[in-house]
Image (tube, helix red, strand yellow):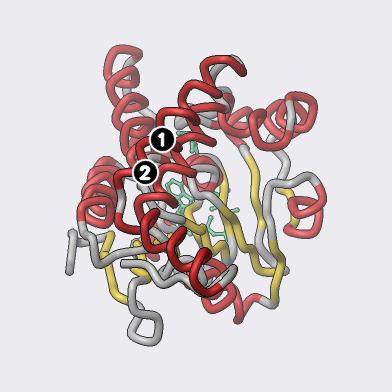
Amino acid sequence: CNVGEFVRVEADPENPGVAVIRIDRPKALNALNGQVTQEIAEAAAAVSADPAVRAVVLYGGERAFVAGADIKEMADLTHARMLEYSRSLQNALTAVARIPKPVVAAISGYALGGGCELALCADFRVAGTKAKLGQPEIQLGVIPGAGGTQRLPRLVGPAKAKDLVFSGRHVRSDEARQIGLVDEVVADEEVYSAAVALVAKYVDGPAVALAAAKEAIDRGMETDLDTGLEIERLHFSGLFSTEDQEAGMRSFVEQGPGKATFN
Ligand code: CAA
């Protein structure tokens, strides 16, 4: 299904159940202008709502994942307009972070500023050897405004996040792997297929349990241990009303481990 001019939701023909959110604004290295941002939010809503989609790949093509928010569009905005602009960027990226299915960012080329922030909203990041990641906003006299000051330190710790945000430097994929900003580095031409392979293994899993696991981990990271355990307990017990729980446990009892098939 097509979302808009710059963002499409595509099926991967060789991997049923995997949907690709393809960002395609090559003239500006996929920079996030207002329209791209809106279309990303729509794409996130579409894959979230479609039960046939079991896993998602974010992909921007070979040259760039996303080179950031659109600097030319932002340059002359006032404080008041920027508050709205940042809110809509944050909302769109949060919609991606809340997709209740495994999501991987396939990063080829630049993932800078808002592009790095978009990648942070995936569950996993696969990058090509020549990929460059970073939060260069400081070099524009500003700071990350699409979640970078919050999601980056949660992933790599505050000191590494400050290194990247204070300096604005580009990080190569090998360093990104070392600090936990990416999970896998592969040859540039293999980024897409490696990313698909990483999430395709979940398409036959129990969808409701996978969504519960993601939500419990993500929400739990935002709160104290007691509240996190409460979130876990509610999700865990809630799963005892699903067919997948019944099938999974019956299969273990009758056939032993690892034989269950799910809806
Ligand atoms: N906004 C608008 N246009 C952009 C862009 C951006 N973030 N990044 C690239 N482009 C445009 C360039 O202006 C250029 O357009 P023209 O052909 O019309 O001149 C085109 O994309 C190709 O880019 P370059 O010619 O610059 O390509 P390059 O290979 O020489 O350099 C680059 C690539 C290093 C990524 C460089 O384009 C660059 O530094 N881009 C900006 C990166 C950046 O600062 N991102 C952060 C943006 S702010 C932000 O994201 C705030 C936030 O947190 C929400």
For badge 1, the amino acid type reads Ser
* Residue designated by label 1: 237
In this rendering, is residue 149 above or below 172? above
* Residue designated by label 2: 240
What secondary structure is found at the residue carrying circle 1?
Answer: helix
Q: Residues within 10 Å of mark 1 (few under 14, many from 20)?
A: few
Name the residue nearer the viewer: 38 or 97.
Answer: 97
Q: Could you say where residue 242 lies in the image, as x and y percent from the top left?
A: 31, 50
Q: Residues within 10 Å of mark 2 (few under 14, many from 20)?
A: few
Does residue 140 appear in the picture of this structure? no
Query: Residue visible at 49% across and 31% down?
Result: 232
Q: Could you say where residue 150 lies in the image, as x and y percent from the top left?
A: 56, 25
In the picture, the quarter occupied by the C terminus is bottom left
What secondary structure is found at the residue carrying circle 2?
Answer: helix
Number of callouts: 2
Q: Could you say where residue 168 lies in the image, as x and y percent from the top left?
A: 68, 35
Name the residue nearer the viewer: 94 or 211.
Answer: 211
Whether residue 197 sits left or right of residue 139 in the image: it is left
Whether residue 2 sits left or right of residue 168 in the image: it is left
In the picture, the quarter occupied by the N terminus is bottom left
Query: Residue visible at 27% across and 19% down?
Result: 81
Whether residue 22 sits left or right of residue 142 in the image: it is left
Q: Distance from label 1 to label 2 (Cα)?
A: 5 Å
**Which residue sits furthest bottom?**
14
Q: Could you say where residue 10 lies in the image, as x and y percent from the top left?
A: 28, 72
Q: Is there CB contact under 8 Å for labels 1 and 2?
A: yes
